[in-house]
Image (cartoon, rainbow, N blue to C red):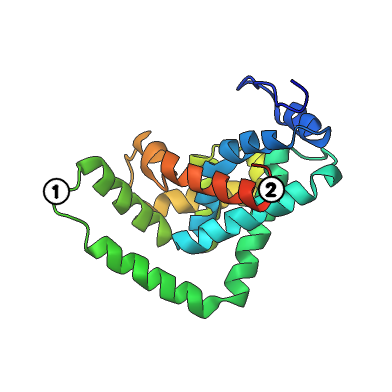
Amino acid sequence: MAGQTKAIPIQLSDEELILRILTGEKRLFEQLIRKYNQRLYRIGMSILESEPEVEDAMQTTYINAYEHLSGFEGRSSFGTWLTRIMLNQCYGQKRKAAYRLSHHVQLANSADMNTPANEIVNKELGRVLEHAITRLPEKYRLVFVLRELEELSVREAAGVLGINETNIKVRLNRAKIMLRQNLGEYMKDQVYGFHLSKCDVIVSKVMRHLQLV
């Protein structure tokens, strides 16, 4: 039927999705949102440390990316381009609302103290890891999140942060020294986990704002 969106294979590349979105299949933007929600959430938490602030930053980032999608020239990957938008948004919010950020951090810390005693061990360890990463200086925390959690290459991380590759390597090594050792693969699954329910909320907000539903 005319006007309907065809089913999209999960293996479709970002470039192919963007082309189809720009040629009229606008609802396919949801595929990109779901693909990058985890990365943007982790980036946001490493800077803002407050879920409400991070979710606002993510929503604004996706809206800006959608509205400027036709201007994406492919000089870097779409993921790198999107991450840069998110970083700019996070730093903008931090500059403009420092007092609100402090308030949200205090609320988040208070909520952590009230964690039920019977919380499963995996979630408890995840919380401990998040706290340890939060205590890293921001410049080391960002590199750690990009390289170890999001698994960006040294070159990709350098491109996102606008510093040279040597600095990326140095900051990552220093970040690792500051953190407890022997955390293994567990870290990737537990730290700043972006669960399906959160993913659905972001998707719904962005798609409604862009009137794509």
Write the residue at 69% across / 52% down: 63
**In the rendered image of this protein, does residue 83 appear above or below residue 155?**
below
- 118 left or right of 36? left
Within 10 Å of disc 2 (Cα), the crowding (few <14, some 14-19, many 20+) is few
Write the residue at 36% across / 56% down: 132
Residue 153 seen in this snapshot: no
- 135 left or right of 75? left
**Image quadrant where one finds the C terminus:** top right
Write the residue at 32% across / 46% down: 126
Query: Residue 51, labelled with which disc?
Result: none
Amino acid carrying label 1: it is Asn
Residue bearing the label numbered 1: 118
Nearer the viewer's eye, disc 2 or disc 1? 2
**In the rendered image of this protein, does residue 30 appear above or below residue 140?**
above
Residue bearing the label numbered 2: 211
- 153 left or right of 65? left
**Image quadrant where one finds the N terminus:** top right
Within 10 Å of disc 1 (Cα), the crowding (few <14, some 14-19, many 20+) is few
